[in-house]
Amino acid sequence: GAVVSQHPSRVICKSGTSVKIECRSLDFQATTMFWYRQFPKQSLMLMATSNEGSKATYEQGVEKDKFLINHASLTLSTLTVTSAHPEDSSFYICSALQGGNEQYFGPGTRLTVT
Amino acid sequence: AQTVTQSQPEMSVQEAETVTLSCTYDTSESNYYLFWYKQPPSRQMILVIRQEAYKQQNATENRFSVNFQKAAKSFSLKISDSQLGDTAMYFCAFWTNDMRFGAGTRLTVKP
């Protein structure tokens, strides 16, 4: 099956710094990728839809200036958490869309902001 | 807006028994897809089963089957012959142009 990778799997950063998370589709091209956030013992919440070559679409309540998304190629989308704060600590999951609705998920990135 | 409701936060079942997880959804769309995902402790999302709304026949994947009631907007998952490896969080999800997840059901299979 299709494989999606995320890097890093875990990251710890200091408050006020920025951190970048990469999402790659390894064996297929994805014009659309999604970014989710998952707090402990909660569900996945869609943050934004990332479209190759165009601006990301953010869900209501998600600060686009804080969560910068760049989908520069058909196999790579990046999420940059700018000026991170402890409340940004969470599990971030990406997925890549193959075909109309076949979604493949990355393994997730655990972000801890100290 | 689409909403997905899973009313069972936690469930448990004895190994080899059958368990059913409930899911209801609300939408005004006529064309959509429904999914059940499994999230084990590794937190990797694993597709269990999918159902196209235009298909009346319930989807089946080995020990996993769904009961799709479109008029009632219900989409339950039945796991037969439960195995210890089935222990995980299970999320019901709804797709039109993006995916919306339910709150999840934590399933524990007991030996």
Image: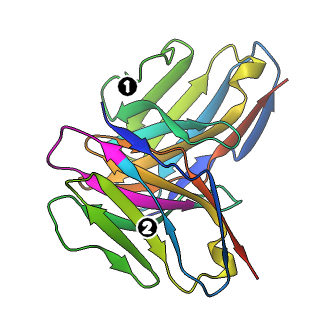
Q: Is A80 in the magenta? A: no
Residue B65 is at least partly visible in this image = yes
Question: Quick check: B11 left or right of A63?
Answer: right
Residue drawn at x 37%, y 44% as measured from the top left = B99
Q: Are marks 1 and 2 on the same chain?
A: no
| Spatial CA span between label 1 and label 2 | 33 Å
| Relative to B30, residue B59 above or below | below
Question: Residue tagged by mark 2?
Answer: B77
Residue drawn at x 45%, y 73% as measured from the top left = B78
10 Å crowding of disc 2: few (<14), some (14-19), many (20+): many
Coloring scheme of the render? rainbow
10 Å crowding of disc 1: few (<14), some (14-19), many (20+): some
Residue range corresponding to the magenta coloring: B25-38
Identified by mark 1, the residue type is: Ala
Which quadrant holds the C terminus of chain A?
Answer: top right
Which quadrant holds the N terminus of chain A?
Answer: bottom left
Q: Nearer the viewer, residue A70 or A44?
A: A44
Pinpoint residue B62: horizontal percent, then vertical percent: 43, 85
Question: Quick check: B10 left or right of A51?
Answer: right
Q: Looking at this view, name the residue that lies furthest to the right.
A: A114
Pinpoint residue A77: horizontal percent, then vertical percent: 46, 38
Question: Disc 2 on helix, strand or loop?
Answer: strand
Identified by mark 2, the residue type is: Leu
Pinpoint residue B10: horizontal percent, then vertical percent: 65, 56
Question: Quick check: A59 left or right of A23?
Answer: left
Label ID, residue A56: 1
Residue B5: quadrant of the picture:
top left
